[in-house]
Image (tube, rainbow, N blue to C red):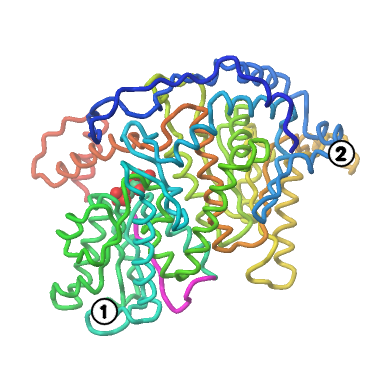
Amino acid sequence: MSPPAATKRRPSNRSTVRDASPAKGPRGAKGGAKPSVKAVRDFRPDRTDAWKRLVGYAKRSDATTLRMLFAKDPKRATKLSIEALDMRVDFSKQRVDDAILGDLLALAEAADVRGRAKAMFAGDRINITEDRAVLHSALRAPRNASIRVDGTNVVGDVHETLARMAAFAKRVRDRRWLGHSGRAITSIVNIGIGGSDLGPAMAYEALRSFSDRNLTFRFVSNVDPTDFSEAIRGLDPATTLFIVSSKTFTTLETMSNAKAARAWCLKAFKGDQKATARHFVAVSTNAEEVSKFGIDTANMFGFWDWVGGRYSMDSAIGLSTMIAIGQSGFAELLGGFRDMDQHFISAPPSRNLPMLMGLVGIWNANFLGAGSVAVLPYDQYLSRFSAYLQQLEMESNGKSVTLDGKPVHWNTCPVIWGQPGTNGQHAFYQMIHQGSWIVPCDFIGFCEPINPVGDQHDQLIANMFAQAEALAFGKTSGEVAAEGVADWLVPHKVFAGNRPSTTILCEALTPRMLGRLIALYEHKVFVQGTIWNVNSFDQWGVELGKVLAKRIIGELAEAKPKLGHDGSTNALIEWYRKRR
Ligand code: G6Q
């Protein structure tokens, strides 16, 4: 993409940044001193000139269709595609032109996306409500890098943990990690939830073809006992290892499942407590709780408060991934993350993949009124990718107050959903093609098949190209009528087209490529959160439900609880208690 002229404009109302008073230590749930970082911004995207101009373009945007944009500029596909890191990302089927892109880039400049990205990479405490640095980039930093938090270079700790993980993973992969009865471990069960589950579960599926096929991997997350019961089905306790993954080691679901696992394991070993040490390891920041549970802290792999749960799959939370694909595979995965980090921090905004992904998302959500985004990988191995992104995007940017605590007057994170093609084509694509909502789509495909069978991979990718083409260009009533369709049927067969999508075409689904793809979305989330001026790194919205659940768990256990909820909740509790 050539940088549109508008990027050179100086936004008239640049983001104002004020220094807050220095923090006096960690902020508890009730909040302590004011945040120490230059992060409490009163930036209002809707007050920038760029935003105001974008509102104007959006009003006229129905008059400019993708058909017209492509007809006007034969080089559009080349100009609006970026080739980098063995991928071609084609934005040309997004409803943007030079003026729109120019002002989106001006908006990013007004929000100081690049400055804020540098602050994040440098370890500034940009997660102001938890007074934490946001340093998932340090998890993949090379050994010789220096990233300081409170004066300490954290890269050394990262590599020390990676080395311990590698030594452990190798013992398991070499069948030298023996269970309590002396038999080698061959089944690995990760117990965790949210950020301690979605990444490992997604990565295992994605990289299954690189994994040791003689090891069995299962993932347990839900407090619903069905999840645990089904996960251990067919497994032998003597050859099963549980990785209890929990940053806090206090999460209700994970601790309940970990206790169930311990009971299942100890039952097989006639209550011999010593078995725990051979069949349980922990990934956590909470050594005290790990030890209380009975796991030897020598078998605990740590991480740090500057790693957010949903940004943690490349920390020790990825232990199951490393066991599956080995140390070298995991190093490749980290290398992929790092490639995208470097691209994000160094590529000019108009050629910067996460920047452009973020900006077209803002255009679609804030100006074209799209309330959701479908992520549609044309690769069965990415079957959990959309679920992973749901957390990454929606937990990060599903906020409605700004960093300075004011209500937002603009929409923030849309709903993220999707599943692999071609299956969705036979189900929900109808709505994307002819429904009343605009659903921007991300199509993700790979040139090299992992499992070549006849021409099936070509069929798969042909379908992906066809869907993006159909969405963009549709079929007019004239074209339908020209096929001899009866007049009354014509309206039903018309495809309005003009439906935006981005196509991400990658060379091959390798560990390195997976790392690049995930970091692409991580930084896209950062770009959008910065423009919306929300804290992308906290998740207070999950707290209230947790607190209420604790209270109700107590009430379900009591003989005659005094219920003080609303009428509906009281009645539901009573109805349940009578029938369970
Ligand atoms: C992610 C969230 C959340 C978290 C889980 C599990 O960013 O913080 O999904 O990962 O609640 O938490 P623990 O790892 O502490 O068990």
Give the residue number, with chain letter if any, for mark 2.
74
Q: Is residue 95 above or below residue 140?
A: above
Res 454 quadrant in image: bottom right
Dot 2: what SS? loop
Whether the magenta-drawn stretch holds residue 219 is answered as yes
Residue 313, how many percent across, how many down?
42, 55
Q: Residues within 10 Å of mark 2 (few under 14, many from 20)?
A: few
Give the residue number, with chain letter if any, for mark 1.
179
Dot 1: what SS? loop
- The front one of 24 and 217 is 24
Q: Tell me what residue is drawn at x 71 percent, y 31 percent.
A: 96
Question: What type is the residue that disc 2 sits on?
Answer: Pro
Q: Residues within 10 Å of mark 1 (few under 14, many from 20)?
A: many
- The front one of 437 and 174 is 174
Question: What type is the residue that disc 1 sits on?
Answer: Gly
Whether the magenta-drawn stretch holds residue 271 is answered as no
Q: Distance between the residues labelled 1 and 2?
A: 64 Å
**Which residue is at the far left?**
559
